[in-house]
Amino acid sequence: MAAESEKAFETASNRLNIINPAMPELIFATNNLHKLQEIQQAVGNKINILSLKDIGCDEDIPETSPTLEGNASLKSRYIYNQFQKNCFADDTGLEVEALNGRPGVHSARYAGPGHDHQKNIEKLLAELQGIVNRKARFRTVISLIMNGTEIIFEGIANGNISDHKHGDRGFGYDPIFIPDGYQKSFAEMDLDEKNIISHRGIALQKLMNYLKSFEQ
Ligand code: ITT
């Protein structure tokens, strides 16, 4: 679930990327404004991304599945069934090795009632206090529904959990995730840099490669 402050309030018409009628159109079923910005930045002007707000949907679609795949599917199917338009949704989890894959599918609400990104980070750092193995991975699953057919794409970013926060960009657990091969956190990267190596960026690249197969 996205925090209230992150609700995707923008519509296509007031975003910088002007709608191009020649481009394919896809609804991105999210209420998380940060995700929407990341995806828009990644696809550039190759696809017209419509937000839930663009299509007049203000639902917070329940994520009741025990898996990322199941939740991504729930969100995309909900939108396709309501609007009969091509759409996709992602579900993402942070899987920490020393915690047997937690918080995983529960990443958004890890700190329990009243959770927010700060509380989730504090809880994770407290659980990892004194633990040497800091290995973790972000895993994103995208469910795309094109003309009624569902296709699943996965993206993984491996890294380590730092012992305190670094940077103030991005969202969620970004300030404590140091991707492999880097000395800085996701929250110290701009969107372009994060998108190249991130779980969501990798899954989205697979989706875009798939969409190319529809080009004449
Ligand atoms: P939706 O409306 O798309 O469901 P959400 O915020 O609920 O938005 P997810 O369920 O996919 O998003 O993600 C669960 C949590 O995982 C999210 O609230 C963040 O705390 C964290 N998360 C997801 N993607 C992340 C990223 O790229 N960087 C850091 N944290 C991320």
Image: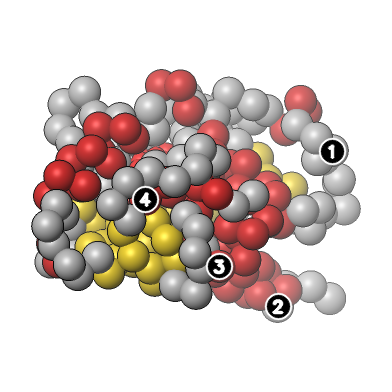
Q: Secondary structure at mark 4?
A: helix
> Which residue is under mark 4?
176
Report if the CB atoms under discs 2 and 1 are less than 8 Å apart. Answer: no
The quadrant in which residue 146 appears is: bottom right
Query: Comparing marks 2 and 3, which lies closer to the viewer?
Result: 3
In the image: residue 117, left or right of residue 213: left
Establish if 180 lies above or below 79. Answer: below
* Label 4 CB-ligand 1 distance < 8 A: no
Viewer-side label of 1, 3: 3
Marks 2 and 4, the one that precedes in the sequence: 4
Q: Position of residue 176 (x, y in %)?
A: 37, 50
Label 1 close to label 3 by CB (< 8 Å):
no
Q: Amino acid at mark 4?
A: Ile
List the residue tagged with mark 3: 197
Q: Give the residue pinned by disc 1.
A: 18
Mark number displayed over residue 213: 2
Is the C-beta separation of discs 4 and 3 under 8 Å?
A: no
10 lies above or below 18:
above
Instruction: Check the image and report above or below for 87 versus 159.
Output: above
Query: Tag 3: Cα neighbours inside 10 Å, few (<14), some, or many (≥20)?
Result: some
